[in-house]
Image: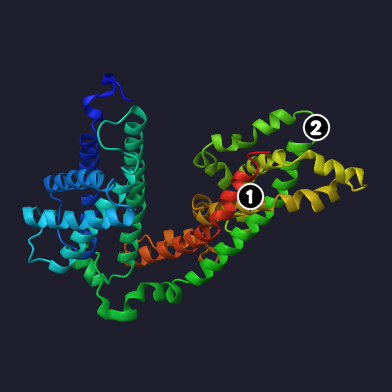
Amino acid sequence: MRTVTEHIWYRQSDFVSAMIGAAWGASSAVTVTVALALMTGAAVAPVMMASLIAGAVAAVYILRMQHRLEGTALVVSGTTVFLLLFLVMTGLEPFSLPLEVHTLSQAVAFVVMALFTVWPLSRMLVDAPQGWLDRHEFEGAIINFLYWFGYLFFIIIVAVPFYVMVMTSLKSQQALLANPLDFSLDLDKGFGLFRSYTELFEQFNFGEYLLTSFGVSVATVIVTLLFSVPGAYAVARLRFRGQAAMSRSILLIYMVPMIVLALPIYIGFSMLGLRNSLFGILLIYPVTTIPVALYMLQGYFRGLPAEVEEAGLMDGLSRLKVIWKITLPLSLPAMASVSLYVFMIAWNEFLLAFMLLDDPSKFTLTRGVAMLNSSEIPRQHLMAGAVIATVPIMLIFLGLERFMVKGLTAGSVK
């Protein structure tokens, strides 16, 4: 049983749930209002008092209902209906727009806000009992709120700029000049919405930039693995003078900002005739990726059982055959994650490409996007170029993320 000393006033479940609900109600209202403003182009702001009250009421209602109803779906659906009825009956309006302006969009946003308020709150308060909360239950509720708030915060930081970028790329020059803050779409244009993308491939050679970036990135991955695999194996398995110092100094190159090395690299490449050539790019890109690949792979190699390799040596295999037939097959998850990480670094690299490439026929994709940042080129073309540079690597990462996570964690436990 809880003692009297545990009945601290701020640990009362109704108070805790109301405070968490008010904070989350304000967060969800701001999020939905931003989405409404972006999709309609209207100047709309959240009504914070209504949002705070709605969130607090919904949280207290969830706290009471989750002990009476079985199943999260019933709690969420019941609380959502209750919250909608509560807002309608009390006349609390969550948005500052008059109801006759964008009525349908406001109605949809109203329902979405209710769902977006109720469902996360049901997860935050899932372990909270009625009455007084002990320290573990109180801290759990606070941590759940911080988890959801952080998740929402970082989603907004990524999603809003990406949405603005995509919508701007689909706008016409006349629409941008009329209202730069209107990110709604005119669907009547059909495929005309993608005019900026077709012009990039037809007039600005973005197809060649894509192929160049893909080729450079794949070549960087191959060169990086050719050097990092034997280097990481040597540091992890072999014994030689200076092994510990080399192991600790692998990432020292990242202590020197690339901008500091930019001028020496530019002068050296100019003197050697390597500037404005893809061969020069392929020489310098692995310099930035090999250290991190060495660091990742040596940790994985150390995690592999040495007895497996020793058994191969006792069977008559040479050290190279042991690496080829035993170590590398066991290291495929780590090599896959390193390859994906190196590919992303090479694909997104801008500073070296901007500094070393001047011939448009040899531009990488990031260098081609920078070329669009000109007063003579419409802004929607720049946004379309940014989308073209972002979407492929995003799809590759989302498709192969499980392999990357598996490779990064595979050598963590023996």
Q: Which mark is residue 286?
A: 1
Query: At which x and y percent is residue 298?
Result: 69, 40
Residue density around tag 2, few if under 14, some if 14–19, many if 20 or more, within 10 Å: few
Indicate the quadrant containing the N terminus: top left, top right, bottom left or bottom right: top left
Secondary structure found at label 1: helix
Query: At which x and y percent is residue 297?
Result: 67, 44
Instruction: Give, as a three-letter code, the residue at label 1.
Output: Pro
- Nearest the viewer among 208 and 109 is 109
Residue at the far right in the pictured view: 316
Residue 188 as seen in the image, left or right of residue 326: left
Residue at 16% x, 64% y is 107
Q: Is residue 376 visible?
A: no
Q: Is residue 286 visible?
A: yes
Position above or below: 114 against 379: above
Residue 5 as seen in the image, left or right of residue 251: left
Query: At which x and y percent is residue 251?
Result: 61, 36
State which mark lies toward you, 2 or 1.
2
- Nearest the viewer among 101 and 16 is 16
- Nearest the viewer among 377 and 366 is 366
Query: At which x and y percent is residue 219?
Result: 65, 59
Q: Which residue carries the number 2 mark?
A: 239
- Nearest the viewer among 375 and 220 is 220
Residue at 28% x, 45% y is 67
Indicate the quadrant containing the C terminus: top left, top right, bottom left or bottom right: top right
Position above or below: 237 against 112: above
Position above or below: 407 against 162: above
Residue density around tag 1, few if under 14, some if 14–19, many if 20 or more, within 10 Å: many
Residue at 18% x, 59% y is 110
Residue at the far top in the pictured view: 5
Which circle's residue, 2 or 1, is located before the other in the chain?
2
